[in-house]
Image (spheres, rainbow, N blue to C red):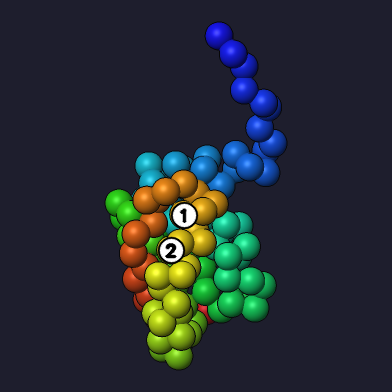
Amino acid sequence: MARSEPKTLESLLPRVLARLAGESGRGHALAPVWASVVGANLARHTSPHALYGTTLVVAVEGEAWAQSLEAESASLCEQLNARLGPGTVTALTFRVQPR
């Protein structure tokens, strides 16, 4: 049996977090991945809240953040799946939850 190259923790962590979020329904586990996708500024105003199946619910500070992110949903899903694995997130839902 051929052995594959060892994987780094950095490459494995997003998929482990996705599995935890999927099993628990709690999207908070995806916070590091979300921050790497949206950047530090957006991560200060948004956070993954729950993962229901393949729908990621994201808490946002206001309606303006929700509208802005809604326009980028397809791109965000693509970037999340590049880190978490194909088909992990197929839809995003935004909920206004002031901090």
- Residue in the picture at 63% in, 71% down: 39
Residue furthest toward the left? 53
Task: Point out the residue furthest to the bottom here.
Answer: 64
Whole-percent x, y for residue 52 in the image: 31, 55
Residue depicted at x 52% and y 74%: 46
Is 6 above or below relative to 42? above
**Quarter of the rendering containing residue 77:** bottom left
Question: Circles 1 and 2: CB distance less than 8 Å?
Answer: yes
Q: What is the x, y in percent for residue 44?
A: 61, 75
Q: How many residues crowd around disc 1 within 10 Å: few (fewer than 14), some, or many (20 or more)?
A: some
Residue 82 visible: yes
- Which percent across, then down, holds residue 74? 40, 70
> Is disc 2 placed on a helix, strand or loop?
helix
Under mark 1, the amino acid is Asn
Question: Which image quarter: residue 67?
Answer: bottom left
> SS class of the residue under badge 1?
helix
Image position of 63 with respect to 88: above or below: below
Q: Nearer the viewer, residue 95 or 79?
A: 79
- The residue depicted at 54 percent of the width and 52 percent of the height is 83
Q: Quadrant of the N terminus?
A: top right
Amino acid type shown at disc 2: Cys
Residues under labels 1 and 2: Cα distance?
6 Å
- In the rendered view, tell whether residue 89 sits above or below residue 71: above
> How many numbered discs sit on the rendered protein?
2
The percent coordinates of residue 54 (x first, y second) are 33, 54
Vertical placement of 45 versus 57: above or below?
below
- The residue labelled by disc 1 is 81
Which residue position is annotated with label 2? 77
Q: In percent of the image, x 37 and y 76: which residue is there?
A: 95
The residue closer to the viewer here, 59 or 42, is 42
Residue 29 shows up from this direction: no
Query: Neighbour class for label 2 at 10 Å: few (<14), some, many (≥20)?
Result: many
